[in-house]
Image (cartoon, rainbow, N blue to C red):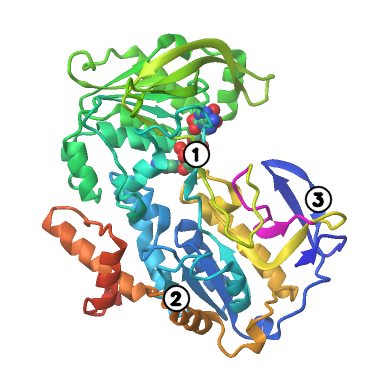
């Protein structure tokens, strides 16, 4: 660890919560140079194999001719959010996995699937095995509303629902009841909320040819859901979704879309916001256009309907009469408050109303989780960092220090926002920090130089001694080929294997026939 103090040759700008809070300076005083880091192999471990992890691995390999990258992933399958987050009806977004696969089969990269950081291997152990550890394991939990009734049956986070329809092993047993109600309330108006609404309301005939999980397709086929309310605490100008996704949901076949024209009245602050953000302006224009069109179908006449509800903040989930599950959401009407030019926030008016429903999806944002040995900002739900360098707050008179050789990228670094491509720029910034530290001789790990077994060899030895069956990329390709073959039989691009045991069985026992052949380096 090194302290942050005056050293004119190295400085960074440290942004906290989006606000530049000043210039922080880093010293290399406490760092001991690892000779082999500069002269020979740079051993890098990336934890997490989603877009942030793979872009980082790719950029490390490009930037450092003598680097070797190991990607550690808790699931037996790679690709993180591309596999378990991107909606099944967005296949074009998943094409990026071809690029990631090329990285994985390059001679200087190894994949260790089915290895859990903090359980199978500790952060401390990884730091001893590698010169550089980059944490890229994203956000696998949810922000909470902390209001009464949040634990009622029928209240799910959108993340769980997305994992469920995308065949994530951890959501295989989620009890998604689409039969005992016709109405779902989705809280939040970001792109995840729109994805969830679209999957609930789109004809299943259009989903059948996607890679949606079989159990989800079957449940949606039998679904009684015909009405979804998308509830936002602010107005149509502030909605967090983007125009492409709004256009897509407005175009869902046979769907009546409702917006209250009164909600579309704009204030001078709203106009100011739209002047600054083209994206918000386009979304607002789409809402305005939709509000002018009389829906062809409605819930009342037996059709499917989507209602955008603005200026409503959830204050409680209402139980059914027998208390067994959710029966509605108690909402407080809001108005916007904020000076000209500043962010407008939702302010409660003291007026309430209930919105009856039989299922709720909370789509108010993902949240990262910490692991032992990692400093973590619980409030912001991310790792304190300076351009990707992990920071640790000192005790008493100790100042903030930088953790040598430990970095973050992706949602763990910046919070749960941005599209897949955002991770490219994000990874670039972290790699710049690594390169700067490497050329400054600051990459040190206490274990590596003196141990005979470091990097991949060291990790393999450690996992073997603990009986952890890690999955290599070649073994994943066997699972991949099985999924594609199963999918082909059903007219789908793939049928995802849901159970981890099944994945491991295929990875370890099915014969391999040079699965990497199709992937060009
Ligand atoms: P998001 O875009 O941050 O949206 C979160 C929503 O939850 C906002 O409407 C927000 O309202 C609301 N919210 C937050 N806290 C709340 C609270 N306490 N009470 C009530 N409402 C609350 O998050 P997301 O939808 O999870 O998406 C995450 C990122 O992934 C985004 O950058 C998104 O664009 C991206 N993504 C992209 C795609 C795509 O490109 N197709 C698909 C999925 C996700 P306020 O605005 O008032 O805070």
Q: Nearer the viewer, mark 2 or mark 3?
A: 2
Q: Are marks 2 and 1 in contact (CB under 8 Å)?
A: no
Magenta region, residue range = 380-394
- Crowding around mark 2 (Cα neighbors within 10 Å: few <14, some 14 to 19, many 20+) is many
Tell me if I can see residue 278 in this picture: no
**Distance (Cα) linking label 2 and label 3:** 37 Å
Residue 109 is left or right of residue 35, and the answer is left
Query: What element does badge 1 sit on?
Result: loop
Residue at 30% across / 34% down in the picture? 198
Whole-percent x, y for residue 516 in the image:
30, 75
Residue at 74% across / 43% down in the picture? 20
Tell me if I can see residue 478 in this picture: yes
Asked if ligand 1 lies within 8 A of label 2, the reply is no
Task: Name the one closer to the observer, 233 or 429.
Answer: 233
Residue tagged by mark 3? 23
Query: What element does badge 2 sit on?
Result: strand
Disc with the residue nearer the chain's start (2 vs 3): 3
Whole-percent x, y for residue 158 in the image:
40, 39
Q: Is residue 390 magenta?
A: yes
Residue tagged by mark 1? 365
Whole-percent x, y for residue 446 in the image:
69, 79
Q: Nearer the viewer, mark 2 or mark 1?
A: 1
Q: Which mark is residue 457?
A: none
Residue 509 is left or right of residue 414, and the answer is left
Q: Are marks 1 and 3 in contact (CB under 8 Å)?
A: no
Residue 232 is left or right of residue 220, and the answer is right
Quadrant containing the N terminus is bottom right
**Main structural element of the magenta stretch: helix, strand or loop?**
loop
């Amino acid at each position: 660890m090194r302290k942050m103090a005056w050293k004119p040759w190295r400085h960074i700008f440290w942004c906290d919560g989006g606000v530049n809070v000043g210039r922080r300076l880093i010293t290399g005083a406490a760092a001991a140079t690892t000779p082999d880091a500069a002269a020979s192999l740079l051993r890098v471990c990336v934890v997490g194999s989603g877009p942030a992890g793979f872009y980082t691995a790719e950029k490390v390999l490009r930037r450092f001719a003598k680097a070797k990258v190991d990607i550690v992933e808790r699931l037996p399958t790679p690709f993180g959010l591309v596999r378990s987050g991107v909606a099944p009806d967005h296949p074009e977004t998943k094409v990026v996995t071809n690029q990631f696969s090329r990285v994985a089969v390059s001679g200087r990269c190894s994949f260790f699937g089915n290895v859990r950081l903090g359980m199978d291997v500790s952060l401390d152990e990884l730091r001893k095995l590698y010169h550089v550890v980059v944490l890229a394991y994203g956000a696998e939990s949810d922000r909470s509303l902390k209001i009464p009734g949040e634990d009622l049956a029928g209240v799910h986070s959108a993340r769980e629902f997305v994992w469920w329809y995308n065949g994530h092993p951890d959501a295989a047993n989620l009890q998604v009841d689409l039969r005992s109600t016709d109405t779902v309330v989705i809280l939040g108006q970001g792109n995840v909320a729109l994805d969830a609404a679209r999957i609930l309301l789109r004809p299943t005939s259009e989903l059948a040819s996607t890679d949606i999980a079989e159990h989800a397709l079957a449940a949606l086929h039998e679904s009684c859901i015909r009405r979804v309310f998308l509830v936002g605490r602010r107005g149509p100008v502030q909605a967090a979704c983007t125009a492409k996704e709004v256009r897509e949901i407005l175009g869902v076949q046979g769907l009546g879309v409702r917006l209250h024209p009164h909600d579309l009245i704009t204030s001078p602050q709203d106009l100011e916001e739209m002047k600054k953000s083209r994206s918000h302006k386009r979304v607002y224009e789409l809402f305005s256009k939709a509000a002018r069109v009389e829906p062809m179908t409605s819930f009342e006449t037996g059709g499917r309907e989507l209602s955008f509800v603005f200026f409503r903040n959830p204050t409680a989930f209402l139980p059914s009469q027998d208390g067994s599950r959710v029966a509605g959401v108690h909402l407080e009407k809001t108005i916007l408050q904020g000076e000209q030019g500043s962010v407008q926030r939702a302010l409660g008016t003291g007026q309430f109303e209930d919105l009856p429903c039989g299922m709720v999806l909370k789509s108010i944002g993902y949240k990262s989780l910490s692991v032992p040995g990692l400093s973590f900002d619980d409030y912001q739900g991310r790792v304190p960092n300076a351009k990707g360098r992990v920071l640790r707050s000192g005790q008493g008179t100790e100042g903030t220090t930088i953790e040598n050789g430990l970095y973050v990228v992706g949602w763990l670094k910046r919070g749960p926002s941005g599209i897949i491509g955002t991770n490219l720029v994000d990874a670039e910034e972290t790699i710049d920090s690594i390169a700067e530290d490497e050329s400054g001789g600051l990459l040190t790990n206490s274990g590596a130089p003196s141990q005979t077994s470091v990097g991949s060899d060291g990790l393999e030895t450690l996992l073997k001694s603990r009986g952890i069956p890690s999955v290599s990329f070649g073994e994943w390709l066997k699972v991949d080929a099985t999924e594609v073959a199963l999918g082909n039989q059903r007219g789908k691009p793939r049928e995802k294997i849901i159970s981890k045991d099944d994945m491991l069985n295929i990875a370890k026992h099915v014969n391999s026939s040079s699965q990497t052949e199709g992937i060009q380096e």
